[in-house]
Image: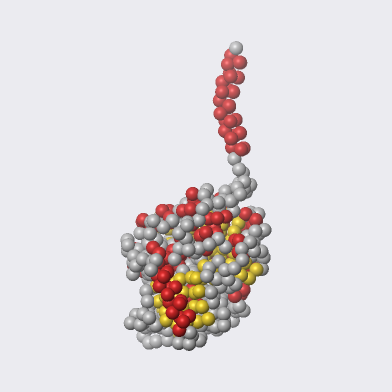
Amino acid sequence: MRGLSLLATTIAFLLPVAISYTAAAELTPLGAKKFSKPNIILILADDLGYGELSCQGNPEIPTPHIDSIATGGVRFTSAYVTAPNCSPSRAGLLTGKFPTRFGHEFNPTGAKNENPAFGLPANQRTIADHLQQAGYVTGLFGKWHLGGTAKYHPYRRGFDEFFGFMHEGHFFVPHPWHGVTTMLRRKVLPGGGQGRRAFGNIVYGTHLSYNEPDYDANNPIVRGSQPVVESSYLTDAWSREAVDFIDRNQDKPFFLYIAHNAVHSPLQGADRYMQKFAHIKDIQRRIFAAMLANLDDSVGTVLKKIRQSRLEKDTLVIFLSDNGGPTRELTSSNLPLRGEKGQMYEGGIRIPFMMSWSGKLPTGKLYHQPVSSVDLHATALTIAGSKPDPKSDGVNLLPYLQDKKQGSPHKTLYWRQGHRAALRSDNWKLVRHSPKNKPDDWELYNLETDLSETNNLASTNPTELQELITQWQQYDNQMIDPVFK
């Protein structure tokens, strides 16, 4: 009897353990994805000019990994963002709306990031908000720049994980910047005078007549919301964190947003990349080349992880820039376009943009119809099985890329930032780039015959000009005044 009692006691003890092991066996093992929802990886470059990638025509700086997204998928030749600078462009990207619809019109820098009035309004839902509700895990690694105070934190905007910084920029390595060559803007050179002068691994230049912004002031690298010391070059750190995120979440649908701060200033090139471009004589251009090559390798690290995890058929990969390149600041090229970051000419708002999805999108396709970053919101939500916001300004691009829909996704695209404004309607482009005391000085271009916007047709096509001004005003009447200036 004692033996039977001991056996019964043993069975009673082991039965819950056996049940727990049975339950565990029914869980999806890591790497064995059971979900029909595809992963979405959104890679955003910062201040990358239209003409700087190899696939965009630059023979000087190889970018094979970014190019592979285009060769393995679709490259858009007429893609736009919603603003010519960082914060409103990101607001449009994440909400699927022109940012002027909700007053997010301007681009804060420095201490303005900590103004409680500034940030992506809480009533605007992000891609991450929607995808979380659709059953996705969500992660952001890199730059936020949509409000630097607590109520705008990425955790409160749909992201499960955040590793990065809140403001508009950050030095790529901790001070005193070992292992990199740094170029800093100054009003006056150390020791006096103008021009360009090197002091060890730091180069100073007065070509823009102002000092380097105080990027790191009150702007730590944080994991969640806790400051950390990050010793790796930030471009490498973002890809390290992204790979770890994929590794931990490959058994479930995920949305991964890698918001690079490269190639945004400050100009800091890692030594191993500076050596690779030693043949470039201009030190400013050499640092830029090092930063871009580093960015390309970071993208390659993430793409390699997708291949190793056999997730190519389960993952939509998107790459684009947040606005055009600031040429004088970075040497960045927007050719063949006119203008640069901050302007409404094509060089400020038309960007490199590509996406790939093995088995779902064609390979090596060039798509020439106008598209916008707002389209990513509707595209992502549709493939996730979530209903896009009916107030979105974007459309789902997949039917157009899969030849299920013909024609253009957009007949008209609209922009406004203070006195600067633009409208594209078919191949006509309306631009207002005048000083504040000349608000009605509109320019008119035909992009089909004049992509570089060199021939202003406003005086010779008054009817077309007035028609586009009327269209712009109709859009503008739907917008609200900026919440923050």
Q: Quadrant of the C terminus?
A: bottom left
Of all residues, the one furthest to the top in this rendering is 1
Which residue lies at the image location 55% right of the left edge and 51% below the top edge?
385
**Vertical placement of residue 43 versus 327, above or below:** above
Tell which of 164 and 406 is nearer to you.
Answer: 406
Q: How many marks?
A: 0
Which residue lies at the image location 57% right of the left edge and 48% below the top edge?
252
Residue 464 horizontal side relative to residue 76, left or right: left
Residue 123 horizontal side relative to residue 454, left or right: left
Of all residues, the one furthest to the front in this rendering is 463
**Vertical placement of residue 442 versus 229, above or below:** below
Residue 397 position, x and y percent, is: 57, 63
- Colouring rule applied to residues: secondary structure
Tell which of 473 and 104 is nearer to you.
Answer: 473
**Residue 268 seen in render:** no
Tell which of 34 and 403 is nearer to you.
Answer: 403
Q: Quadrant of the N terminus?
A: top right
**Vertical placement of residue 84 versus 247, above or below:** below
Residue 407 position, x and y percent, is: 59, 68
Residue 290 position, x and y percent, is: 55, 74
Which residue lies at the image location 55% right of the left edge and 66% below the top edge?
409
Tell which of 378 and 303 is nearer to you.
Answer: 378
Which residue lies at the image location 34% right of the left edge and 67% below the top edge?
481
**Residue 459 seen in render:** yes
Residue 153 position, x and y percent, is: 40, 57
